[in-house]
Amino acid sequence: MNRRSLLAGIALSAMLSTTAFAQDLKLGIIGPITGPNAAFGKQLTDGGNQAVADLNAKGGILGRKIVVVTGDDASQPAQGVSVANKLTSEGVRHVIGPFNSGVMLPTSLIYAENGAIMITPSATNPKITERGLWNVFRTSGRDDQQGAVAAAFLAKNFAGKKIAIVHDKTPYGQGLADETRKAMNAANIKEVMYEGVNVGEKDFSALITKIKAAGVDLVYWGGLHTEAGLIVRQMRDQQVRAPMMSGDGITSDEFATIAGPGAEGTLMTFPPDPRKRPEAAELVKAFAAKGVNPEAYTLYTYAAVQVMAQAAEAIKSTDPKKIAEYIHSGATFKTVIGDLKYDKKGDITRPDYVMYTWKKVGDKITYVEN
């Protein structure tokens, strides 16, 4: 081969490589891959990666292979901002996640400014969609909906009892606690305690002393499973038998591992178990074959990818703003968690919370729908 032919061959190879790369569609999956909430990060990556694999097996989105770019925010807003800046600089314009409301609130502004659409499977703070951003959606419900369900249960089952409200001072934890408190108060239930603790605390003896002195009958927790489990364990150690009630932030079997036997009787709000939906039956089997229990937000993440893909296919474009316009249009999306429609804010239009109780099932304690 002469030099001219060799150079032409190299140029053609480079051009084909560049074209193939340009056809790939980068999809960011963002969550706490490390840190105390890594169990939830695994739910997001399990669900997102499986959805991408299934789509790629059918030709991707509009014939473009999807390439996952994973971002670890460790549930830290500052780290989430760094991840957002990195991913947008790398050309990521389609994002699934993050997990935490506290990370979603600042990072969604960065993604919006850089033309990226995002669908979170789990960030429930109402402010996320109340700000009017064009690019923000979720497959989960909101804390005001969750709080209303919790308050209705308390009004029916704990009328006249002493209720303490404790939260972790985060946008999610305090937001959930405040929405539940608001709904409780509207139902003429007044809490006897309202306390905040810090994320990462390990010793809750001072808090539990106050709970014990107040004769509390139920502790409502706004926060995630790590601190929740420690509080329950330490309450039982101090002979406090009051049950805990919380929201979707404790929806991991790790909660019972941390809390120990005292986890039995814990109450929780979460959507109807997506693993039991007929739309998810085959997928649940596929996860089981891999040894994965697709609990909590695993299927909500899979559904988020489905919504984005179906919108792109419907409009024959991967343009983020056009996808967002279509999702806002009221179109129906067929997902593993059922049919979803969106309002103009980016919230799903169906009510999505019920009550669960943590019970012993076989040899472990887990959450069972009431």
Image (spheres, rainbow, N blue to C red):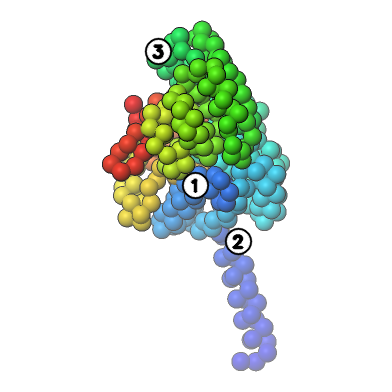
Q: Nearer the viewer, mark 2 or mark 1?
A: 1
Q: Are marks 2 and 3 in contact (CB under 8 Å)?
A: no
The dot on residue 156 is 3
Residue type marked 1: Ala
**Image point 53% across, 48% down: which residue?**
38
Front position among marks 2 and 3? 3
Residue sitting farthest toward the left: 362
Residue ID for mark 2: 22
Disc on the earlier residue, 3 or 1: 1
Residue shown at 54% from the left, 11% from the top:
190
Query: Is residue 361 depicted above or below 12 in this figure?
Result: above
- Mark 3: give few (<14), some (14-19) or many (20+) Cα within 10 Å: few
Q: Residue at x 67, y 83 (%)?
A: 7
Q: Which of the 4 image quarters holds residue 201? A: top right
**What amino acid does circle 3 point to?**
Lys
Residue 359: x and y, percent? 34, 33
Q: CA distance from mark 2 to mark 3?
A: 58 Å
